[in-house]
């Protein structure tokens, strides 16, 4: 039996529609997402363009700043500080990675928790660790939404997250282990021994590595849910961490492209709405 497709495009369309409906029902208040792009990294440029287009389609204003790639740490920090202080700005997104030589952490930590639509500041990540409500990184949130929407069982299930970045791997692991989700989580990384054995234990696999087809069918427990977050660029276009043949073994599988990517963008819109609520622009949910 082929795996059930965890269709990120379809669910993302629903999430976006919900955001648009909430804004409309609230009388279309002015909600502004500020995007900051430092340098001219081509994938980053197109990611920001797509995020701004999504915002526009939902009735969210976007305010974009293009910063030259040779800007200093102080210049980037000054910009984020001014957006943080601007009451007309409700969400701030600093597109990562920053060019070499710039340290992202001090920049991100200038974003107030209530405007932190990427969920990557010290404060937001700290709240996630504590299990407190707050804005959560978009890619792990999208993964969770896909599991929930498709009623993939999580309670007591074994989950393996490949990757330990603060952008994807660690927040994904924290979310999966959260009370109410209740997975037993293993985090694997480049130093993990016997990766195939580790992955084979898992009922849920979240692959956020960036190595093309690192997950092969032999590594996957029959019936497992496999979420392919990784992106590698090859001559054939975008390739995920998961060999498509895994679809013959897995119970559920995200397409890639068309899985985690669209959900990441939709969750950014959801987080922008949540940020606007935290700032009193919209009534609480
Ligand atoms: N679809 C989306 O919307 C979306 C969003 C965000 C990211 N991504 C993609 O997801 C991937 C991960 O992103 P990231 O920001 O977390 O990347 P990252 O910071 O480069 O982290 C990659 C992780 O993979 C681990 N790793 C590398 N080689 C490995 C191997 N052979 N076996 C097991 N683990 C290995 C690394 O281990 P060490 O820690 O030991 O180095 C690291 O923890 C990338 O391909 C990125 O492009 C996609």
Image (cartoon, grey):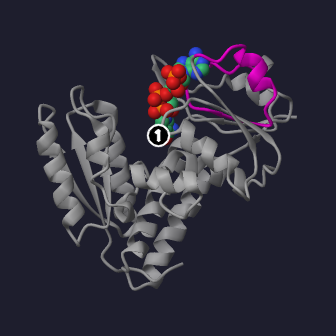
Q: Residue at 56% of width from left, 46% of height from top?
A: 140
Q: Residue at 81% of width from left, 43% of height from top?
A: 157
Q: Main secondary structure of the magenta part?
A: loop
Instruction: Check the image and report above or below for 245 versus 40.
Output: above
Task: Verify whether residue 201 appears in magenta.
Answer: yes
- Residue 212 in view: no
Q: Which residues are magenta?
A: 191-216
Residue 125: x %, y % from top left: 47, 50
Residue 274: x %, y % from top left: 46, 68
Q: Which residue is mark 1?
A: 167
Instruction: Check the image and report above or below for 261 versus 236.
Output: below
Residue 26 lies in what quarter of the image? bottom left
Residue 154: x %, y % from top left: 78, 49
Instruction: Check the image and report above or below for 46 versus 27.
Output: above
- Quadrant position of the C terminus in the picture: bottom right
In this picture, residue 188 sits left or right of residue 48: right
On whether ligand 1 comes within 8 Å of the CB at mark 1, the answer is: yes
SS label for mark 1: loop
Task: Verify whether residue 284 appears in magenta.
Answer: no
């Amino acid at each position: 039996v082929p795996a059930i497709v965890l269709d990120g495009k379809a669910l993302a369309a629903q999430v976006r529609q919900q955001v648009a409906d909430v804004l409309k029902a609230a009388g279309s208040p002015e909600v502004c997402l500020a995007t900051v792009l430092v340098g001219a990294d081509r994938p980053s440029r197109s990611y920001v363009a797509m995020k701004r287009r999504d915002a526009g389609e939902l009735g969210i204003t976007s305010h974009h700043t293009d910063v030259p790639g040779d800007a200093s740490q102080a210049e980037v920090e000054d910009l984020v500080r001014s957006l943080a202080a601007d009451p007309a700005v409700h969400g701030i997104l600093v597109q990562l990675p920053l060019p070499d030589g710039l340290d992202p952490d001090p920049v991100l930590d200038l974003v107030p928790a209530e405007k932190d639509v990427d969920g990557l500041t010290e404060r937001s990540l700290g709240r996630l660790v504590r299990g407190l409500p707050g804005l959560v990184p978009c890619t792990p949130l999208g993964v969770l939404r896909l599991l929930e929407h498709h009623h993939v069982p999580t309670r007591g299930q074994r989950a393996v997250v490949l990757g330990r970045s603060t952008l994807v791997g660690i927040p994904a692991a924290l979310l999966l282990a959260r009370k109410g989700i209740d997975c037993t989580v293993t985090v694997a990384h480049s130093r993990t021994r016997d990766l195939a054995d580790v992955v084979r234990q898992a009922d849920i696999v979240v692959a956020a590595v960036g190595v093309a087809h690192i997950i092969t069918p032999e590594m996957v427990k029959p019936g497992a849910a496999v979420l392919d977050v990784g992106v590698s660029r090859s001559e054939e276009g975008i390739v995920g961490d998961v060999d498509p043949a895994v679809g013959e073994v897995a119970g559920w599988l995200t397409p890639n492209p068309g899985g985690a990517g669209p959900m990441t963008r939709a969750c950014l819109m959801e987080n922008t709405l949540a940020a606007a609520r935290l700032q009193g622009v919209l009534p609480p949910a």
